[in-house]
Amino acid sequence: MNHPPLSGSKLVWITLALSMSVFMQVLDTTIANVALPTISGNLGAATSQGTWVITSFGVANAISVPLTGWLAKRFGEVKLFTASTLLFVLTSWLCGMSGSLEMLIFFRVLQGAVAGPMIPLSQSLLLACYPPAKKSMALALWAMTVIVAPVFGPILGGVISDNWHWGWIFYINVPVGIAAAFISWRILKSRETDAVDLPIDKIGLALLVVGVGSLQMVLDRGKELDWFNSAEVVTLAVVAFLALAYLVIWELGEEHPIVDLTLFKQRNFTVGTVAISLGFMLYFGAVVLLPLMLQTQLGYTATWAGLAAAPIGLIPVVLSPIIGKNAHRWDMRWIVTVSFSVYAICFFWRSTFNPDMGFLYVMWPQLVQGIGVACFFMPLTTITLSGLHPSRIASASSLSNFLRILAGSIGTSITTTMWDRREALHHSKLTEHVTQYDPASVSWFDAMGKLGLGSNQQQALTQLQITKQGYIMAANEIFWVSGILFVLLIGLVWFAKPPFTAAGGDSGAH
């Protein structure tokens, strides 16, 4: 059933409500990263155990996101979105109330599972409310919240963990989520999409849960267990490969698939999804690495690490609406080319980081990268969803977002693993130069001796400096490689084929 586009105050309110829900959920995935040491300390757990707070949410979320398209057809998009948001509020509150790490991880699993449909459905519901001529603007506004939330996450996480109880990183979801659910239901309940009594694809569902769950566990546990030197990781990797390979074969022959893989027959969907996933993988790896490096090696507090990363969100707030307004005049491939070029420049810029750099040296690449971020989400989402029938938008959005989120996990795992491994290599090479025959070493130890430091103190300080330099050299190498990969990605986006009408073409809403 088709509904006419919304207008006036209703359109403003629904845009605000749907954007708030996206903001809240994306914020939640990054806000806990900064607060991990505080959470682990308060609950009497090692920081390595505390990473399960991130892992548990990621695994459950990765499984539930691709189910969105099927669930939306079964229950209706509006009902599913409202229920998801309210359950997210409830599980957030329970996370904040947790008294032990096990309890927190359990509630984070539930939170990740119920959060799955929120991002894809906010996208499809928003597009359904806008007239065809303004769908690009809708996507630009939606993308802006996806961009700004990861920036606010570390700042809020830092401020809360430095000044209040860590539970507040979850409690802040409660008022935002209730408001978003209330407004969305009030405005959209009369615009519910048709629910179809679809049979449950039990085998597809089981394969999805086992395959995606195992893959996410490989990505999250791999570094801790030394990857394929661990029997657990090898077993999980084999299970993931077999389950996902069989899932693809099964779903292509299934009449009512849990995941609609036929979407990949659309050239633009394939190009857009691959480009947004690989780009996000590189981008998110840096989002994790930068605060980590600032806090562990350069002595930044959680709050200051967040503030150093924050400028990335300033330019998109200004640029995104301009790009959205003029999208129908511009070739999306050129906008994405600008995005990837700016990303590459900023990553090459970061590859010159050094132990003595000041706050502004960290901040400037973040500010400039905002241009790349503003030209990233909206144009690539437009390419991905261009030419699809409105009834397929929820499925396309959930599959595309699933692969983007999974790519983010892969980026985090590769980045943190390579950072440690390259540091170990640089550490051993730098240590070789610390001898009594090396003039720089001699003058270094003489200087420390004059400061009154004993032999043990000199050794400890030297090790600390070598470690710091090793980690910064390792981060610079990762930034350099990321820059090269962004240059190569520019070629990929030109395989997309115009016209890039925003999702649903000329048809109105659902």
Image (cartoon, helix red, strand yellow):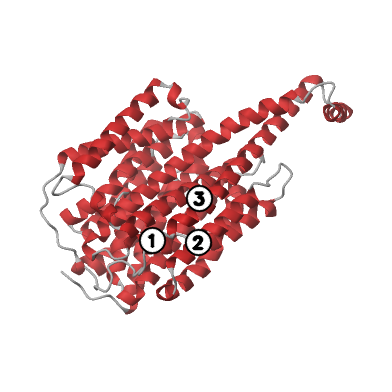
Q: Which residue is mark 2?
A: 337
Q: Secondary structure at mark 3?
A: helix
Sequence-first tag of 2 and 1:
2
Could you say whether the residue bearing mark 1 is in a helix, strand or loop?
A: loop
- Reading the image, the residue beneath label 3 is 283
**Residue drawn at point x = 37 percent, y = 55 percent:** 271
In whole angstroms, how far apart are the C-alphas of marks 1 and 3? 21 Å
Residue at which label 1 appears:
496
Residue 341 percent location from the top left of the image: 55, 58
Tell me which amino acid carries mark 3. Tyr
The residue at the point 15 percent across, 69 percent down is: 1
Tag 2: Cα neighbours inside 10 Å, few (<14), some, or many (≥20)? many
Foreground: disc 3 or disc 2: 2
Q: Could one spot residue 158 in this view of the protein?
A: no
Q: Nearer the viewer, residue 77 or 505?
A: 505
Q: Nearer the viewer, mark 2 or mark 1?
A: 1
Q: Considering the numbered disc 2 on the image, is that residue within a helix, a strand or a loop?
A: helix
Which amino acid does the dot numbered 2 rest on? Thr
